[in-house]
Amino acid sequence: MIWVVVVAAAAVLDQALKFLVTKLIPFENSVTIIDRFFYITHWKNSGAAWGVFQNGRYIFIILTVLAVLVMAIIINRSNSRFLKFSLSLIIGGALGNLVDRVLHGYVTDFLQLKFWSYNFPVFNLADSMVVVGTILLAVYVLFMQKNARRFKYKIR
């Protein structure tokens, strides 16, 4: 199953990059990649996206496991490659962050973008995969699902 490979590759790549960042960049320090735009910044996030719900480790672990199980069931029952790919990206990203939460109690973030005077919150590759997978899922639900009669269960 190619979907297992996509999930595993996403989670392993995320974990490998987090490992490199934690070993090479001291906490709260940055390396400039593109001045005034893109930085590699070592940060720890014990909450969800943008640091909301700090210290919700166990709730996030439970919700992540449940969401991954539901998405795995949908992948197993779907005939849509597009849907399977989008859910695989989401699962891979979710598992990448789940490993951090289970092992460390926080998620390692390291990608930082700055736009003029706005500093976008630091995030990681797993977060990016979840966002891209979610955008693809939205495209599927909004534009493709009506034409995809091969999918056994409708998402409403």
Image: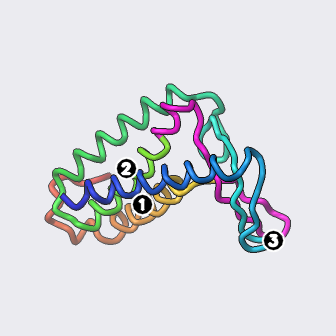
Q: Nearer the viewer, residue 96 or 90?
A: 96
In the rendered image, residue 120 lying in the magenta stretch gets the answer yes
Q: Residue furthest front?
A: 24
Placement of 10 over or under 149, stated as above or below: above
Q: Amino acid at mark 3?
A: Arg
Label 1, on which residue? 133
In the image, what residue occupies the spot 22% across and 61% down? 2
Q: Position of residue 25 (x, y in %)?
A: 70, 52
Of labels 2 and 3, earlier in sequence is 3
In the image, what residue occupies the spot 62% across and 52% down? 21
Q: Position of residue 112 (x, y in %)?
A: 70, 60
Identify the secondary structure beneath mark 3.
loop
Identify the secondary structure beneath mark 1.
helix
In the rendered image, residue 30 lying in the magenta stretch gets the answer no
Within-10-Å neighbours for mark 1: few <14, some 14–19, many 20+: many
Q: Nearer the viewer, residue 82 or 106?
A: 106
Q: Position of residue 55 (x, y in %)?
A: 63, 28
Label 2, on which residue? 91
Q: Amino acid at mark 1?
A: Gly
Numbered label attached to residue 36: 3
Q: Do the numbered discs 2 and 3 sit on residues whose CB atoms are within 8 Å?
A: no
Of labels 1 and 3, earlier in sequence is 3
Instruction: Please tell me whether mark 1 or mark 3 is closer to you in this view.
Output: 3
Q: Nearer the viewer, residue 3 or 23?
A: 23
In the image, what residue occupies the spot 23% across and 53% down? 75
Of labels 2 and 1, earlier in sequence is 2
The Cα atoms of the two marked residues, 2 and 3, are separated by 32 Å
Placement of 74 over or under 135, stated as above or below: above
Identify the secondary structure beneath mark 2.
helix
**Span highlighted in magenta in the image:** 98-122
Q: Amino acid at mark 2?
A: Ile
Q: Do the numbered discs 2 and 1 sit on residues whose CB atoms are within 8 Å?
A: yes
